[in-house]
Image (cartoon, rainbow, N blue to C red):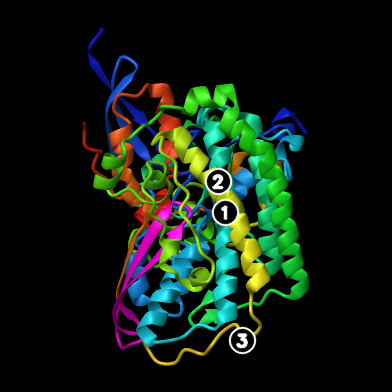
Amino acid sequence: MNCREKSPWIVHFNCNSCNGCDIEFLACLTPIYDVERFGIVHVGNPKHADILVVSGAVNHRNVRVLKNVYEQMPSPKAVVALGACGATGGIMADCYNVLGGVNQVIPVDVLVPGCPPRPEAIMDGILQAARLLNVHQKDRHAGAEVRLTLQPVSEPEKV
Amino acid sequence: MPGSKSIIPFGPQHPVFPEPLQLRLVLEDEKVVEALPAIGYVHRGIEKLAEKKEYTQNIFLVERICGICSFMHALAYCQGIEMLMDVTVPDRARYLRVIWSELHRLHSHLLWLGLLADSFGFESLFMQSWRSREAVMDIMEATAGGRVIISTCIIGGVRRDISEELMAEVLKTVDVLERDLEIIRPVVFDDYSVKQRLVGTGRITSEQAYDLGSVGPVARACGIARDFRETGYAAYKEIKVTPVTETGGDAYARARVRIREMYQSIDIVRQAVRDIPAGDIAVPARGNPEGEVISRVEQPRGEVIYYIKGDGTKNLERLRVRTPTFANMAPLLTMLPGCELANVPVIVLSIDPCISCTER
């Protein structure tokens, strides 16, 4: 038990979600559920965060943003993927612009099932991820590998 | 250097937005001179996927266009298919659809109020409105089994009935909400600091709003009395809705419209619970849709248009959705030039953007 586990700071990134997971995640912050009693603070800057909460599947446009947000976070860090879309793409898996679950791009530690998951489940997932912060990253993902090789994407047009 | 322009990327990962929208703001000192939206971060390709799935499976797909107004998406889709297949929905189902629609409107407006309060740093109003919203989520769960995406709308009616005891619970919930709103309303309407941030922010004229095709509360805040519930879909034939209008055209007027709409929704729920007839909740729909149809429904953010084309098979030939935020994007880009950088979050949230609707 150390400070990280006692008070993990989380950053939220909406990858490709329908808002269902996002509003349930935001509901965690509000008085009925109130994750701050676990010391969990929602921050806007990935450089301050220990846990990345991702909702939704990955698509061709946000894949670089997601990688960028993840890489800006200092180690040790953990990733929580919310909902069916975050796990596999869910109902959207067959869409032409959907690459699949979050684990196609970054290593995911905790998958929270549901469409959308309940706030209690999301809180449980975040707390499980907080415990993992003490485990070295390479021990956590033993055997898991990142499957998707990214096609080079053209840089965004300059204004 | 004074007078020189700089470009600030606003988003896609930004603490104010729950959704990834990127605005490239061209700034002159602190003033926004131009706003260029860069979208596509939530584009999934649902319209194409809807052609591959069967028309009955599509209900679950269109509900996931947007999790906030999911019931209204399913409603617009089912109404379109029902028009194509000449299905007459039982009276009780029409009333149940109204009850769930208005509960969704209530939760969406409270959610929006929290996000708006968060955008100008009024953290306790954010917490209060989201606390009140949980009452709606609880009754949604009690009546439909799900908190956010409830999947009760089916072609030909609804999937679940609301029993007498639960109807009493619905009434109790709206009573609690009305009591909470009595506390929230004066804060938004009269509080000095809130008015300082909202009055005059993001003003557009009535002509601009009309010409740019704005819908929903953005249009109604400019005095355009247009509400698609007036056209009388579902049980709005019997339950009359008068559009809530304000004349300010700024963020304050939009906030007033939405707060007053919450009272209106509470009244509609009460009327619907009082007048709901007994009877079946669904009729079987046989066959496949053929022909083309346009179905319109008033969502919390404005009017959504579904264009459905079927060719007599179980797969649709085309599904096209025009969502309210898409219509309100042009007014937003008119509001932004000339404002201070610090007001950008307030203006963007005052139109209540739903990016996952817009990009699908």
| For residue B62, above or below residue B213 | below
The mark lying in front, picked from 1 and 3, is 1
Image point (71%, 41%), residue name:
A131
Q: Secondary structure at mark 1?
A: helix
Question: In terms of image quadrants, where is residue B97?
Answer: bottom right
Q: Chain of mark 2?
A: B
User: Badge 3, how many Cα within 10 Å: few under 14, some, many 20+?
Assistant: some
Q: Residue furthest top?
A: B1
State the extent of the magenta-drawn residues as a range: B289-317
Q: Chain of mark 1?
A: B
Tell me, yes or no, whether the two marked residues, 1 and 2, touch with CB atoms within 8 Å. yes
Q: Which residue is mark 2?
A: B260
Q: Report the disc number at residue B264.
A: 1
Which residue is at the front of the view, B119 or B241?
B241
Q: What is the x, y in percent for residue B344?
A: 40, 29
| For residue A87, above or below residue A34 | below
Q: Chain of mark 3?
A: B
- Which amino acid is tagged 1? Gln
Image point (62%, 30%), residue name:
B123
The mark lying in front, picked from 2 and 3, is 2
Which residue is at the front of the view, A109 or A35?
A35
User: Badge 2, how many Cα within 10 Å: few under 14, some, many 20+?
Assistant: some
Q: Which residue is mark 3?
A: B280
Q: What is the x, y in percent for residue B279?
A: 64, 86
Which residue is at the front of the view, A87 or B284?
B284
